[in-house]
Amino acid sequence: MSARGGAALLAVAALACAGCGGGTPHGKGDRAARPAHGQERVLSAPPARALDRYASELGRSHAARVAAAKRWGLAEVPLTPPAPPARKPTLETREGFEVDGHRTRRLPPVFTTVPTRQRVVFLTVDDGAEKDPAFLRMMSELNVPYSAFLSNYLVKDDYGYFGRMQDSGVTLNNHTLRHRFLPDLSYKAQKREICGMQNVIEKRYGKRPVLFRPPYGDYDRDTLRAAKACGIKAVPLWNAEVFADRWEYREWDRDIHPGDIVLTHFRGKDDWNGTMPDMVRRFLKLVTDKGYAVARLEDYL
Ligand SMILES: [Zn+2]
């Protein structure tokens, strides 16, 4: 090695060490390590203390996730989702899900999967019958995002439960006032069902939803016209459904895919062979085993 090469290596070593918080030329204990003269502009690494803090926060949050996974009976820690896309994907109505004049009338898109290459899925929870406090705790402690689609006749006996959900970062979306089979109703009656729920959510929770899911996933052109008139921008359906004891799939391959929307319900032992935490365990086990993270639907729409 030439003398010149050695000097260059030393300079690199000094550079690397300037931000590392270890021994500096100024001696031990000098925690606020400074770059050598002339290198201040080159070095953009944060000072050692900030790095230490960042590392310990990362460690703490990871440790917290490991502990939460163990506490809630998960074999694996859920994967951390990637940063949401800087440019939101263009949503198209899934083939076979269009109504007459869907495009020309600019009706809200109806889809079951969000177009993305990221290995993420989205969890959506419908109706609102079961109000299990353990579900709220579990999702907060595991830091797993989800979106709620609420029907007023089921949530009205305890608006507070869904208020706490909203406080934990969950978006509350529209699933109509009374969960009727909408295609049987007139345009006016459908509009009452949808706009009425917009008003309830706005009054109770301070925000008018932009996402709407028709009960049973059934709709006609009047549904989408009414939804649009009520301020709805998108109609996410689902590509798979998870229960406390099983999965059901829309597609022949019986699998999940990047961007798939997964449906489940606020239900418990009255309707299911298990509890909401049982459902979450079943959901996360398959998702994590297949290498997917759970992302926040609203970040992609
Ligand atoms: Zn429903």
Image (spheres, rainbow, N blue to C red):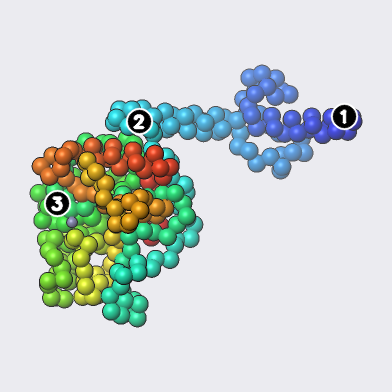
Task: Check disc 3 and report the residue beneath it.
Answer: 155
Q: Mark on residue 75?
A: 2
Q: What distance separates the C-alpha of mark 2 from that of mark 3?
A: 33 Å
Q: Nearer the viewer, mark 3 or mark 1?
A: 1
Image position, residue 211 (x, y; %):
29, 61
Image position, residue 232 (x, y; %):
28, 67
Sequence order check, earlier mark of 2 and 3: 2
Residue at 27 percent across and 46 percent down: it is 247
Element marked by disc 1: loop
Sequence order check, earlier mark of 1 and 2: 1
Q: Mark on residue 1?
A: 1
Sequence order check, earlier mark of 3 and 1: 1
Element marked by disc 2: loop
Q: Mark on residue 23?
A: none
Image position, residue 171 (x, y; %):
29, 53
Amino acid marked by disc 3: Val
Q: Nearer the viewer, mark 1 or mark 2?
A: 2
Q: What distance separates the C-alpha of mark 3 from that of mark 1?
A: 74 Å
Residue at 33 percent across and 63 percent down: it is 111
